[in-house]
Amino acid sequence: MDSTGAQPTKVCHVVAMPYPGRGHINPMMNLCKVLVSKNKNILVTFVVTEEWLSLIGSEAKPDNIRFSSIPNVVPSERVRAANMTAFFDAVMSQMEAPFERLLDRLEPPPSVILADTYLLWAVGLGNRRNIRVSSFWPMSASMFSIFQHLGIVYIFVLNLFTFTFMFSFRINPQVLQHILDTFSRLPKAQCLTFPSTYELEHQIIDALRAEFSIPIYTIGPVIPYFQVEDKLSPSTHQADPLNYIEWLDCQPPNSVLYISFGSFMPVCIAQMDEMAAGLKKSEVRLVSHWFRFAKQEISKMPVIRVRDES
């Protein structure tokens, strides 16, 4: 209690633990930035491997977000694609112990663990230490539902006909089992959060809420508030891209397509050109967040281009 007699404000200490991949780290960081912008009494400790700290540690962030690291107990980001099964195994078996040791050193004591849903060990760790766990799935609710039912689909459909969608994932059975184990532990978390909107995926969200006993929240896209890379030429017939919100507000409902590619799966220039040509032919309104740009076609399209945060 201070000299005025007022009770000191209690800080909510959120320990954020993303899966060690750019497509998981970026959305979780963006979520943390939104959290601290809404409440100055939230402190976030954002935990990454030492390698990832060297990659993102110098990036600008709010004062109430701090970095902390665990040793490089998983294969390097630069080579992990060569053996994803080994990488996934390391994430599941080697990260928990150093993360728990880190929790012992943190001050103030953690109030909440914000964990990527892929980190199946995080829920058990939080329960063991009596720390609430919020599970964050950094993709759409529809993708969550697909992964959730992969085991069922694999069993019941594989023997009936060629299921090309399943094989297009190229999921190693061991990795698939890890994913299924993750979903089986989810009910022991305190909540599940999606970077989506209810209106966009209401049928999926309703089905998941009926299936899971824990609260399920949709928080909207956790992409950076767009920082425009450059101004478009007048030939695009767009307003100043800095006013993209104003432009979006003027479009008819359900008429704008948002396109984003991650940084992990490679897409060749020919494929990008082909997709760009198809989008141009469709005359769809779009906002793009492309990792690579098919510049010849994209420059001719009605598009607001925003800076890639990868």
Image (spheres, helix red, strand yellow):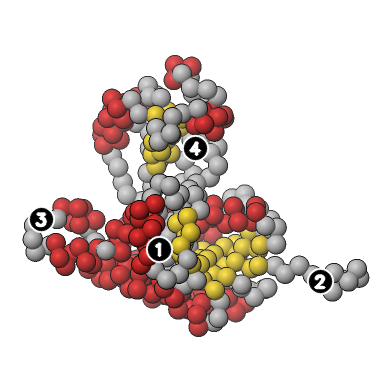
Q: Residue at label 4?
A: 307
Residue contact at pointers 2 and 3, CB within 8 angstroms = no
Image coordinates of residue 131 in percent, x first then y, are 56, 76
Q: Residue at x 14, y 55 (%)?
A: 163
Q: CA distance from mark 1 to mark 4?
A: 35 Å
Q: Residue at label 2?
A: 7
- Quadrant placement of the N terminus: bottom right
Image coordinates of residue 30 in percent, x first then y, are 54, 52
Give the SS element for disc 2. Answer: loop
Along the polypeptide, which appears first: circle 4 or circle 2?
A: 2
168 relative to 300, above or below = below
User: Of discs 4 and 2, which sits in the foreground?
Assistant: 2
Q: Residue at label 3?
A: 162
Query: Within 10 angstroms of label 4, few (less than 14), some, or many (20 or more) residues?
Result: some
Residue type pointed to by label 3: Thr
| Residue farthest to the bottom, as pictured | 128
Q: Residue at x 43, y 29 (%)?
A: 252
Q: CA distance from mark 4 to mark 3?
A: 40 Å
Q: CA distance from mark 3 to mark 1?
A: 31 Å
Q: Residue at label 1?
A: 209
* Residue 243 in view here: yes
Along the polypeptide, which appears first: circle 2 or circle 1?
A: 2
Give the SS element for disc 4. Answer: loop
Name the foreground residue: 248 vs 51. 248
Along the polypeptide, which appears first: circle 3 or circle 1?
A: 3
Residue contact at pointers 1 and 4, CB within 8 angstroms = no
231 relative to 224, above or below = above
User: Of discs 2 and 1, which sits in the foreground?
Assistant: 1
| Residue farthest to the right, as pictured | 3
| Residue farthest to the top, as pictured | 235
